[in-house]
């Protein structure tokens, strides 16, 4: 499906990602995809080239007007050559995962060249176990997390069948405008947009006020957020990784079975995002204590992007359509269940109060500044270096494809996302679901967090503690950080938990009856088409609001006991369904 194309001129938020970028804070996103077998390089290049009409931004470069009188424009690059964007790399033996991570860090360190379209892809051969990899790098001004998943779906194939490539169309870009034309068009656009920007902000504020007056659930949510305000606005202290960054990137990753996260969230009536934040905050607490600092009465504030795409853009349009959820999480709660319930209470109140909508309206006020002022402020980031940090870490969770994807017939077996970090934020974390797994990937700065890789150990121990406290048995044992094949099961059960995508359709036919009700659980739903994700997310709001209106739960709930052999088996059967359902919940987007 082609991605929706934005107008030629960048919007304020897209331009901000260009303006804020520095050597110490590269603002590209991307990921590392691992494949079974070897990707044939020439075939891969030809395949991507055949799809460029579906990805127009891949042949466009950014052009700034004189004095930044307006936001930059996208213009087709007359010198576009796909060989300047796709590169072939081979790892030396033994081709370990550590070598792949080191290569990825080196690739993610430099800025993208602004004299050509802002993307690069590296095909990596020589990975141990007869595997290969693809390292993708695309500027944040082109896509956010949700749009990035849409882009991945265009680049990849839904099946291993290789089809004949369409006949290549001639590329005839229009002539680039001269400097005078760029300046005059940008100046005219800036003047014309001033009234519309004021109108948009005014309408957004009026709409939010009307929502609070006419929607009792939204008003209740807002009231609960006000009750939390002392915690939300309490002064923050720098955490050990909040130090000036150098720009040198290192990456680390791990993964967990989605079925286990599903079982945890089902048992306690939470969301996958609540589980993710519980695991991350637990890891941050451990990292802080490793550095000899106390976590008592200290808070952790991650920057949590939220997807705010309307229904018509659900498939992932170009550009950034995000807001932020201003969560502030206590580090001193030791009990992982109590910590998850605290997080759930806070996020549910914010969803009910439509805080993402309110924050987006606030960001709209910044868009009222003239483009030259926006560029000037972004180019001088010293005003953001305050004794009290604004946030500690970027934490983004994006629902990825629930079904396996392929490149030139080779199956993608892992997908580790990448999110930027910089200024005084030495560690950021991106989470993506794909084909029954949750992939956690850290981006760390070599100077600000030289021991940032220890966070992987803490993420894994934090997840184990939460799983154990929730009474969920381990479904896929891990030894020394490596995947271990699960134990063989009787054939009758094996068919129910075979590869997620094919099994899912069979499960639906084999299970005409409704599933037994579980605590705070939604009824089973059909798979959600990409085009309807955002539309259906609105239907989830009443459920969240209804939860918010129920009496307060005890600090730690103990769910009704389930037979151990049923917990993970049932969750594994529904892993694909819940990976899709995850998109209906209000994600901690990003796309990044």
Image: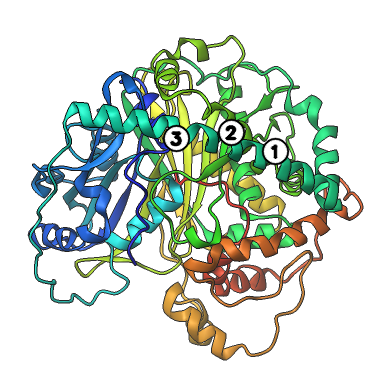
Quadrant of the image occupied by residue 535: bottom right
Mark 1 neighbour class, 10 Å CA radius: few under 14, some 14 to 19, many 20 or more: some
Question: Would you say 434 lies left or right of 279 here?
Answer: left
Q: Secondary structure at mark 2?
A: helix
Across and down, in percent, residue 365 comes to 59, 29
Between residues 414 and 27, which one lies in front from this camera angle? 27
- Residue at horizontal 22%, vertical 41%? 75
Q: CA distance from mark 2 to mark 3?
A: 11 Å
Q: Which mark is residue 205?
A: 1
- Mark 3 closeness class: few <14, some 14–19, many ≥20 residues within 10 Å: few
Q: Is residue 539 above or below residue 200?
A: below
Q: Residue 401 in the image: state x and y as whole percent.
A: 43, 63
In terms of sequence position, does the residue under pointer 1 or pointer 3 come before the other? Answer: 3
In the rendered image, which residue does mark 2 sit on?
Answer: 198
- Corner quadrant of residue 422: top left
- At numbered mark 1, what does the secondary structure look like: helix, strand or loop? helix
Quadrant of the image containing the N terminus: bottom left
């Amino acid at each position: 499906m082609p991605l929706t194309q934005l107008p030629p001129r960048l919007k304020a938020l897209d331009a901000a990602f260009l303006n804020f970028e520095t050597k110490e804070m590269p603002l590209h996103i991307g990921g590392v995809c691992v494949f079974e077998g070897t990707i044939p390089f020439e075939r891969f290049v030809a395949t991507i080239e055949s799809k460029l009409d579906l990805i127009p931004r891949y042949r466009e470069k950014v052009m700034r007007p004189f004095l930044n009188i307006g936001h930059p424009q996208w213009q087709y690059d007359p010198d576009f050559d796909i060989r300047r964007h796709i590169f072939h790399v081979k790892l030396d033996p033994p081709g370990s995962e550590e070598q792949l991570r080191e290569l990825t860090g080196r690739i993610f360190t430099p800025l993208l060249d602004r004299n050509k379209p802002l993307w690069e892809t590296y095909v990596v051969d020589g990975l141990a176990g007869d595997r290969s990899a693809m390292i993708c790098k695309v500027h944040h001004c082109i896509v956010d997390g949700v749009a990035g998943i849409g882009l991945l779906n265009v680049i990849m194939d839904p099946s291993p069948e290789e089809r004949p490539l369409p006949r290549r169309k001639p590329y005839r870009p229009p002539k680039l405008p001269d400097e005078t034309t760029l300046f005059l068009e940008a100046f005219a656009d800036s003047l014309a947009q001033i009234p519309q920007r004021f109108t948009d902000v005014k309408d957004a504020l009026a709409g939010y006020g009307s929502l609070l007056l006419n929607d009792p659930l939204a008003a209740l949510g807002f009231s609960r957020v006000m009750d939390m305000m002392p915690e939300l606005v309490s002064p923050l202290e720098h955490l050990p990784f909040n130090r000036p960054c150098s720009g040198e990137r290192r990456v680390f990753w791990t993964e967990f079975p989605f079925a286990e996260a599903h079982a945890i969230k089902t048992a306690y009536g939470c969301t996958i995002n609540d589980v993710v934040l519980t695991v991350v905050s637990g890891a941050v607490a451990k990292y802080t204590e490793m550095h000899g600092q106390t976590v008592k009465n200290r808070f952790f504030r991650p920057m949590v992007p939220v997807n705010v795409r309307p229904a018509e853009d659900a498939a992932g349009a170009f550009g950034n359509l995000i807001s932020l959820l201003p969560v502030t999480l206590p580090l001193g709660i030791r009990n992982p269940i109590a910590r998850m319930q605290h997080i759930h209470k806070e996020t549910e109140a914010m969803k009910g109060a439509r805080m993402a909508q309110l924050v987006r309206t606030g960001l709209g006020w910044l868009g009222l500044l003239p483009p030259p002022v926006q560029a000037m402020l972004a180019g001088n980031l010293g005003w953001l270096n305050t004794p009290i940090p604004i946030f500690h870490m970027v934490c983004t969770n994006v629902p990825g494809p629930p079904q396996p994807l392929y490149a030139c017939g080779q199956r993608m077996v892992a997908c580790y996302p990448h999110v930027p970090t910089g200024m005084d934020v030495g560690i950021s974390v991106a989470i993506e679901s794909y084909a029954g797994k949750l992939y956690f990937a850290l981006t760390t700065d070599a100077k600000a967090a030289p021991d940032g890789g220890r966070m992987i150990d803490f993420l894994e121990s934090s997840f184990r503690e939460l799983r154990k406290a929730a009474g969920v048995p381990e479904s896929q044992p891990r030894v020394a950080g490596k995947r271990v094949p699960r134990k063989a099961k009787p054939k009758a059960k094996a068919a129910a938990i075979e590869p997620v995508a094919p099994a899912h359709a069979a499960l639906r036919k084999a299970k005409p009856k409704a599933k037994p009700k579980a605590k705070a659980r939604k009824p089973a739903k059909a798979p959600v088409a990409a085009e309807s994700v955002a539309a259906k997310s609105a239907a989830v709001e009443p459920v969240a609001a209804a939860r918010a209106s129920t009496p307060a739960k005890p600090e730690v709930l103990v769910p009704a006991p389930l037979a151990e052999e049923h917990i993970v088996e049932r969750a594994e059967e529904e892993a694909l369904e819940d990976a899709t359902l995850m998109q209906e919940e209000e994600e901690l987007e990003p796309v990044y």
